[in-house]
Amino acid sequence: MRWRLALALSCLALVALAGCGGETAADREARMQAARADSLAMAQELYNATVFDTVSWESPDARVQRGALVWRASCEKCHGEGGRGDGLGAQQLGIDVPSFLVPDWKYTYEADSLRERIFVGLAGEMPNWGLHGLGYRDIDAAVAYINTLVSAAR
């Protein structure tokens, strides 16, 4: 019984310390933005476009099929099923995600630029997938799949 009381008091003390540190919401936001900028810089430093030259596929279809799997697991949450930027995750987070299907989308058929964007991410809400679980092969496949979505819409 005493150990439960001691544990409860320890937990209360930690909660009190966390709340009494003098950090405001603006301080937390600034700290989060600094951490995000740090992660983006790290991803940019690690990015190596020449690695994509070593990626090979059994066939173009195999590449697109793998890209569809990567898309469903990692991209569709925010970008939506068809790439319109209307994914449930984006709606829940209240973030504006661009549609890949608009005529002036800047990455249309720009595989090199799109690979880098996926690997590095964006300062807003776009994850830096190169640091968070997608290897070069999966990024290459995702780009192939995205290009099929764009082609189908044209």
Image (tube, rainbow, N blue to C red):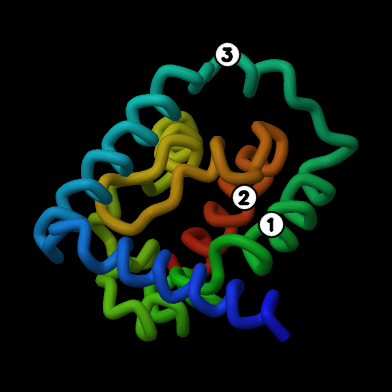
Residue name at image x 65 percent, y 32 percent: 136
Mark drawn on residue 70: 1
Q: Is residue 126 above or below residue 119?
A: below
Label located before the other in sequence (3 or 2): 3
Q: Viewed as shown, does residue 68 lie left or right of 147?
A: right
State the image coordinates of residue 112 (x, y, percent, origin top left): 46, 29
- Residue at label 2? 142
Residue name at image x 53 percent, y 17 percent: 48
Q: Are marks 3 and 2 in contact (CB under 8 Å)?
A: no
Q: Viewed as shown, does residue 49 lie left or right of 52?
A: left
Judging from the image, what secondary structure is the residue with disc 2 in? helix
Task: Assign the C terminus to one quadrant of the image.
Answer: bottom left
Q: What amino acid is at disc 3?
A: Thr
- Tell which of 1 and 83 is nearer to you: 1
- Tell which of 18 and 75 is nearer to you: 18
What crowding class fits label 2: few (fewer than 14 Cα within 10 Å), some (14-19), or many (20 or more)?
many
State the image coordinates of residue 34 (x, y, percent, origin top left): 23, 40
Residue name at image x 38 percent, y 76 percent: 90
Q: What amino acid is at disc 2?
A: Ala
Q: Is residue 5 above or below residue 71?
A: below
Alpha carbon separation for disc pair 3 and 2:
17 Å
Task: Assign the N terminus to one quadrant of the image.
Answer: bottom right
Judging from the image, what secondary structure is the residue with disc 3 in? helix
Label located before the other in sequence (1 or 2): 1
Alpha carbon separation for disc pair 1 and 3:
21 Å
- Residue at label 3? 50
Judging from the image, what secondary structure is the residue with disc 1 in? helix
Q: Are marks 1 and 2 in contact (CB under 8 Å)?
A: yes
Instruction: Check the image and name the residue furthest to the front.
Output: 2
